[in-house]
Amino acid sequence: MSEDFPMMHNRKRTGYVSPAVIAGIISLIIAALLLLFHAALVFIIPLAVFIILCVVAPFFPTSGFFLRVVSRGRTGKNFVSLTFDDGPDPETTRPLLKLLDRSSIKATFFVTGERAVLYGDLISEILAHGHDIGNHSYHHDPFLMLRSTKTLFQEIESTHTALTRFHISPAAFRPPVGITNPRLDNVLKQFGLYCVTFTCRAFDAGNKNVRGLSGRILKKVKPDDIILLHDIRPGRDITTEDFLREVELILAGLKRMGLQVVPLTELIGKPVMLRIRDGERT
């Protein structure tokens, strides 16, 4: 652990037992009962079910199978929050900030450390416009949760270190593609981070599937949803203007539905990002 990163600290979390632990205990109980009838079934049924759960559950970002995740608000009001992943990008982030300004919308940008280093001016602009920034790993490796614990730690630490240049320390981490693993919780504890996922997404493949984006979001969005979007340049034959138009349609549609866009910190009741003053987070 880097000694020049004073903001990291262990944060105790009590009173929470992950569904993975519960599933494991239930599997052991079932195995013990089956042992009374047929020894072979001990290895076939409970173990198979538990393995399937461990493989499949992490692909459901709201499940929190391995650790506690924040995937929606609990306000009980007609509030939603916008989050943008994978950026910043010089082609799309800047005009997006202007669009959000026109609607007086504050969003959260889950940035990669690599892009924060490349486009530091955009990080400064995001902050200057009053938005929050979260940790989204350094390289956005979609297979990050299959890597070693050391790699997982380095991906999170490197992004945190990169963002200290801007006198901020994210309190929220969003894993690439929303996938988690059993080791993530212990790594996050070392940084005082919690995991944020989402409840409403359009499966836009990182802005490669922008056409119809607004329709897919508006069809499923509900109060207290955390909406997942991306602020990287569109792929294929789609232009930045096409992307911005879809975002405008989303904002207009949310307003028409009586849903108010609020900052993520207001929706979930905890800070997403902390300011660093004199080496301390505030």
Image (cartoon, grey):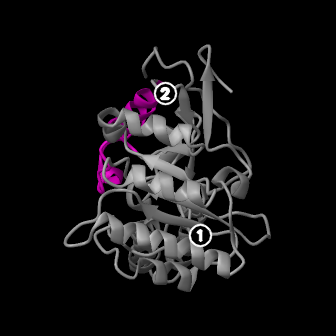
Q: Is residue 227 above or below residue 142?
A: below
Q: Residue at x 57, y 46 (%)?
A: 131
Q: Amino acid at mark 2?
A: Phe
Where are the magenta residues, as a range?
137-164
Identify which residue is drawn at 35% across, 55% down.
92
Earlier residue among tags 2 and 1? 1
Which percent across, then down, holds residue 130?
60, 43
Is residue 12 on the magenta stretch? no
| Residue 154 highlighted magenta (yes or no) | yes
x%, y% of residue 102? 57, 58
Q: Amino acid at mark 1?
A: Ile
Asked if residue 100 lies left or right of residue 42, the reply is right
Q: Main secondary structure of the magenta part?
A: helix
Decide: is 116 above or below 280: below
Q: Residue at x 20, y 73 (%)?
A: 237
The image quarter in which residue 235 lies: bottom left
Alpha carbons under labels 2 and 1: distance apart: 47 Å
Q: Nearer the viewer, mark 2 or mark 1?
A: 2
Residue picked out by circle 1: 26
Mark 2 sits on what residue?
166
**Disc 2 crowd, CA 10 A, few/some/many (<14, 14-19, 20+):** some
